Every structure is written in structure tokens, then in C-alpha cells.
Amino acid sequence: MQERRKENTNQGNTNSCSFANIRPIMVDMPYPPIQVEQRNTAYANLLSSDYCGSTSELSAITQYINNENRISNERCPMAKTLLGIAMAEMMHLQKLGELICLLGGTVDYTARQQNGRQVMWTPKFLDIPGNVRRMIIADIEAEKAAINQYRMHIKMIKDRHVNAVLERIILDEEYHIMMLKTLLNETVDCNM
């Protein structure tokens, strides 16, 4: 390891982790069509929390990208997995944005709560621990929270088209937990 650092000092610091050909990590199933039974701003407001609330796709994307950037130089395979998960979360964000618009809502990084309160997305929503193991644990907990929130929203939304998309997103989130648990097992010997 010291020789590598010495070599980097003479040649400048580089990150040799290549992210070429990274694909979204998701269940190999199509998504239902993005459609709604009718406009319903109350449903759009619920989805705004999934889109950009404290537990949201935007928060997940940002947290995964941050984690990937911080570990890519030392733990390239793990970083690639995190980037693949982030890419799937980007697809979820896009699908939620489409649903919100079809329901008559607004996509502007503001979560509209049932009590009328509006909360703009902030990086304060993120959990960014200092070491890899805690990082992965925080990602697992965020995925679990997202699944719970989606399930709660499915109970509140009486639109079969919207719920079908949310159910499909949950499948990806469950798959992400499985992938993250595998990464967590790899961090047992890690001092990071």
C-alpha cells in the first residue's frame, strides 16, 4: 500500500476505479405503465414525500453518490454497487415525478405534508457516517424506511395504477437491501 501511495505522489493522485458500463441495480421485471385513474393532488402530495422528503428517492440518490465517491479509490467494487443502486433510485425518482405531474401535483423538491406544511429538500436529511460499515448500515436503514413509507402510502392511495408502480419500486428496494447486506458482510475485515 505504501508503494502505491508513493507512486501516486510522483504521478499525482488518480482514481483508477472505472464506472464504465455500470447499470442500474434492480429486479429484472418491467415497471407498470405510468398512469393514474384521475387527477388527485392529495395523492400527488403523498408522493412528494417519496420524491424529495427526508425519506425519499432524492435523499437516497444523494447519499449513495456521496458514499460511492468517498470509497471508490479504495473499494472500487463496492463503489460500483452503490452507483448501480443510485442509478435505480434515479429511475424511481423519475417515475414518481411523472406520477406526481399526472396527479396534478408539482415537482419542485418540496414535500407537501398532509397538514399543509411544505418542506424543501435539504442535505440535512442524509446520514453520512465516517466509516464504510456504518455507511452501509445507514443505507440499509434508509431502504427499510423507504419501504415502510411506500407501504403506508399504498394503504392511503386508492389508485391501482399508482400503487402498482409503488409495489414495483418496493421490489427494487428489497433487492437493494439484499445487495447491501452482502456488502456489509464484506466490511467485517474493513478498518474504514
Image (tube, rainbow, N blue to C red):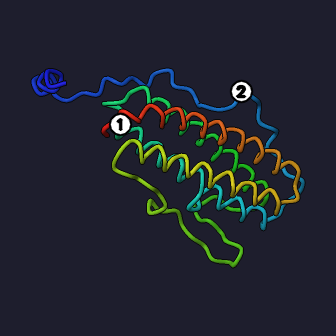
Q: In the drawing, does residue 24 fall left or right of residue 137?
A: right
Q: Which mark is residue 71?
A: 1
Name the residue nearer the viewer: 55 or 162: 55
Residue 69 spot, x, y in % from top left: 37, 39
Question: On the rendered image, what quadrant is the N terminus found in?
Answer: top left
> Dot 2, crowdedness within 10 Å: few (<14), some or many (≥20)?
few
Task: Provide the residue designation for mark 2.
Answer: 28
Q: In the drawing, does residue 134 fall left or right of residue 180?
A: left
In the image, farthest residue toward the front: 188
Q: In the drawing, does residue 95 fall left or right of residue 165?
A: left
> Dot 1, crowdedness within 10 Å: few (<14), some or many (≥20)?
some
Q: Mark 1 belongs to which amino acid?
A: Ile
- In the rendered view, tell whether residue 79 sits above or below residue 34: above
Residue 122 spot, x, y in % from top left: 47, 62
Question: On the rendered image, what quadrant is the C terminus found in?
Answer: top left
Name the residue nearer the viewer: 105 or 89: 89
Residue 96 spot, x, y in % from top left: 69, 50
